[in-house]
Amino acid sequence: MKIGKPVLRLNNFEFIVFLGIVMTPWGVFRGTREEFLKYISVKKNKKNLELLEQSLVNLVDQEYIAVCEDGKHVIIYIREKIEEEMNIGPKMIKRCRDIAKKNNKTFDKTIQLMKVWLAIQICYKNQPFTSTRLEELTNLSSYQIREAIKLLENEGDIFKTSRVGNYMYCQGKNVDLCPWW
């Protein structure tokens, strides 16, 4: 599936819901809301059901998805094709989960890793780029971005960054993406 800049600015729960729909076969989910929470590996409780409901409303309002009620079942599908192209798939999501788990990080860190990785892919076309640019794209803090870059770069096979500028002034970073991602 291809996604782009606007999706990276979604809050974490909306981002998880959107990714869940993206990862379903043909971008369509049919089942109960409780089944959807199970599908995206989120505990079923009142708070998460409310968050899911609000996320669905927000994603529909932003025209990312459409939702149809069918009795107690819901049909959710991708509605808008996003212009900026980004590759995302199950391997990337699994890789971010594994990195977070290996470093004893929370599930929110998985989302941060994914947002930063996708933002770096967007910025790859216009190098050098700054942390400020990544903040604009992801809606994450500079600390969250630095920590995510460090974790991703320490893997050794995702990307490598290098500073651009002289020893007194850094103009940004260049990135070399590994070809298999």
Image (tube, rainbow, N blue to C red):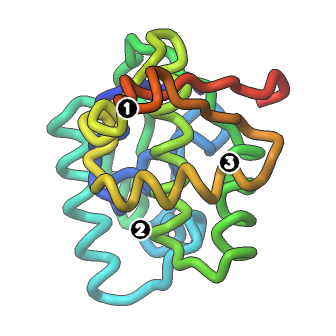
Residue 168: name its quadrant. top left
**Front: mark 2 or 1:** 1
Distance in Å between CA atoms under marks 2 and 3: 36 Å
Q: Which residue is mark 3?
A: 153
The x, y position of residue 65, in whole percent, is 34, 36
Q: Earlier in the sequence, mark 2 or mark 1?
A: 2
Tell me where residue 159 appears, x and y as whole percent.
Answer: 70, 35
- Up-down: is 105 above or below 83? below
Mark 2 sits on what residue?
Answer: 33
Q: In the rendered image, which quarter is residue 38 located in?
A: bottom right
Residue 24 is tagged as none
Helix, strand or loop for disc 3: helix
Query: Of the residues tagged 1 and 3, which is closer to the observer?
Result: 1
| Mark 3 surroundings within 10 Å by alpha-carbon count, few (fewer than 14), some (14 through 19), many (20 or more) | some
Q: Does residue 30 appear in this view?
A: yes
Q: Tell me the CA gap for discs 1 and 3.
A: 24 Å
Of the residues under marks 2 and 3, which one precedes in the sequence?
A: 2
Q: Position of residue 51 (x, y in %)?
A: 26, 70
- Front-lying residue, 65 or 176: 176
Q: Residues within 10 Å of mark 1 (few under 14, many from 20)?
A: few
* 131 w.r.t. 31: above or below: above
